[in-house]
Amino acid sequence: MHGLSVGDELTAIGPKNDFELSQNAGRSILIAGGIGITPILSMACELDRRQAPFFLHYACRTPEAMAYRAEAERFGAARARLYFDGGRPEDGLQLPAVLALPKPGAHVYVCGPRPLIDATIATAREIGWELSQIHFELFSNGVVSGGNRLQVELRRSSLKLDVRPDQTILDAMIEAGCDPMFDCKRGECGACSVKVLEGEAEHRDYCLSEDERADNMMCVCVSRAHSMKLVLDA
Ligand code: FES
């Protein structure tokens, strides 16, 4: 292996931001759960600097556990609301009210634990927000397990895989020596999507559209199956 020596040139590219503020948002709704405030607070500060309209909703169990509380309160009641549910969801953030009245040009940004992300996306979609208006960042890895042992046939590769409950289909493909396309491994980018030829996918991704799902595409990095077996066009 070649090591670097003093005087060697090192080329680096800038960081890639997958959780970016829209440049032209009419209004931004910022939702943070727990330590998910970290990127959301930066967004609030940036929108404040731009003098762009936003409202910050920040939820935590107790005031004592809330990070950056003073910084969030600095925006005042007209632009921020803090929630302390103490373990009682009915006292916490009420997503249907927060997300009511989707408007063209508005954007929703959410960061926190997976249940908050899932609930925000599901509520927003029910109310009528477009997927392109909803942005999120998970504070966890993608779902790896949570399913039964699964048989997967890769039709084009003529391979049969036995996917363990603690393994994703993508990881089983890699373990079998395949070279599948992937990027985020969290169901967010769609790079790993493949067509299901037989069987029924259980979708756990955040990126495929209703049309793509109807067309039998699935993200193998997070999704599993309702059927015992899947046949994939891979
Ligand atoms: S690798 Fe990004 S959705 Fe699967």
Image (cartoon, rainbow, N blue to C red):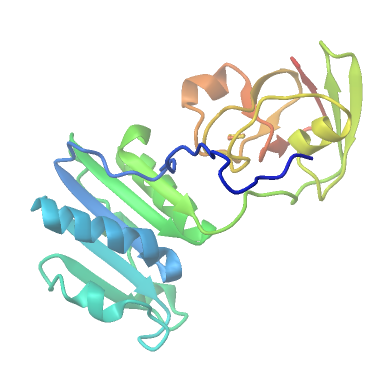
Q: Residue at x 62, y 20 (%)?
A: 216
| Vertical comparison of 25 with 230: above or below | below
Residue that protrudes farthest toward the bottom in the picture: 64
Q: Position of residue 98 (x, y in %)?
A: 26, 58
Determine whether 215 is above or below 192 in the image. Answer: above
Where in the figure is residue 91, as x and y percent of width and height?
Answer: 35, 77
Task: Give the residue displayed 30% in from the left and 38% down from the top.
Answer: 133
Q: Quadrant of residue 55?
A: bottom left
Give the percent coordinates (x, y) of residue 47. Answer: 17, 53
Q: Position of residue 48 (x, y in %)?
A: 14, 58
- Image height check: is 94 above or below 166? below
The residue at the far front in this view is 7
Task: Please indicate, yes or no, whether residue 90 appears anywhere in the rendered image.
Answer: yes
The image quadrant where one finds the C terminus is top right
At 81% across and 30% down in the image, what residue appears?
Answer: 173
Q: Quadrant of ligand 1?
A: top right
Q: Residue at x 53, y 57 (%)?
A: 114
Q: Is residue 218 left or right of residue 122?
A: right
Residue closer to the observer: 179 or 164: 179
Q: Is residue 181 above or below residue 168?
A: above
Q: Is residue 167 left or right of residue 59?
A: right
- When asked about the image quadrant of residue 73, the answer is bottom left
Can residue 53 be seen? no
Q: Along the line of sight, which residue is nearer the eye, 17 or 110?
A: 17
In the rendered view of the protein, which quadrant contains the N terminus? top right
Residue 165 located left or right of residue 202: right
**Left or right, residue 53 beside residue 204:** left
Total count of labels: 0
